[in-house]
Image: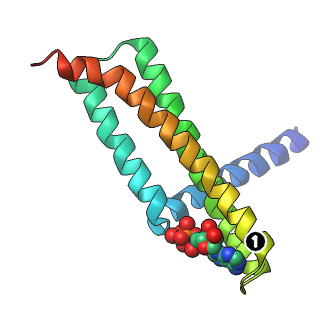
Amino acid sequence: MILKKLKMSRLIKSFGWALSGLKDCILHEKNFRIQYIIALGVLVAGFVFSISLNEWMIILLSFAVVLCFEIINSAIEKLCDLVMPEYHAVIKKVKDMSASAVLLASIIAFIIGCIIFLPKVISLF
Ligand SMILES: Nc1ncnc2c1ncn2[C@@H]1O[C@H](COP(=O)(O)OP(=O)(O)OP(=O)(O)O)[C@@H](O)[C@H]1O
């Protein structure tokens, strides 16, 4: 029973730390803010165009992939800046590769958005 309570309080604490990381990203990471504002815009478009359940799931999955990659990219950048504040060729590779994950996910999310919304927008005219 005590062990269960300890495990539970540890779980709640971990959840709190993760939430504070998310708050940090929202407040201090410019790129993350831009991406979640775009995500909010797409959410509104989803309601306006009454997209289907399957379309909602694909859109939400795209948000999750892009936003999670952005958070991991920011964390990697922070770690790189701490470990190597001066220019280093390996750090450049690490940062560029990490940023490329966000870029790739964003391009695919954009294509998915076009596939879902373009026919609906075109049908308005
Ligand atoms: N210490 C470093 N050594 C080598 N190249 C670096 C270093 N720091 C940054 N760079 C290069 O500059 C690019 C931008 O790095 P930076 O850390 O400013 O990221 P950013 O995408 O501009 O993120 P943010 O806007 O959050 O600062 C990296 O992708 C990398 O090519």
Q: Residues within 10 Å of mark 1 (few under 14, many from 20)?
A: some
Total numbered labels:
1
Return the residue found at the far bottom.
Answer: 86
Q: Residue at x 67, y 71 (%)?
A: 78
The residue lying toward the viewer, choosing from 97 and 44, is: 97
Examine the rendering and report whether any part of residue 40 can be seen.
yes
Image quarter where the N terminus lies is top right
The picture quadrant where one finds residue 117 is: top left
Residue appearing at x 41%, y 49% in the figure: 36
Per the image, label 1 sits on a secondary structure element best described as: helix
Residue 73 pos. (x, y %): 64, 58
Q: Amino acid at mark 1?
A: Ile
Q: Is residue 23 left or right of residue 48?
A: right
Ligand 1 image-quadrant field: bottom right
Determine if the C-beta at disc 1 is less than 8 A from ligand 1: yes
Relative to 104, does residue 91 appear above or below in the rendering? below
The residue identified by callout 1 is 91
Instruction: Name the residue nearer the viewer: 103 or 40.
Output: 103
Q: Is residue 44 left or right of residue 99?
A: left
On screen, residue 15 above or below 78: above
Q: Is residue 2 left or right of residue 12?
A: right
Expressed as whole percent of the image width and height from the top left, the position of residue 34 reads 39, 56
- Vertical relation: 15 (above or below) 83: above
Residue at (48% x, 57% y) in the render: 32
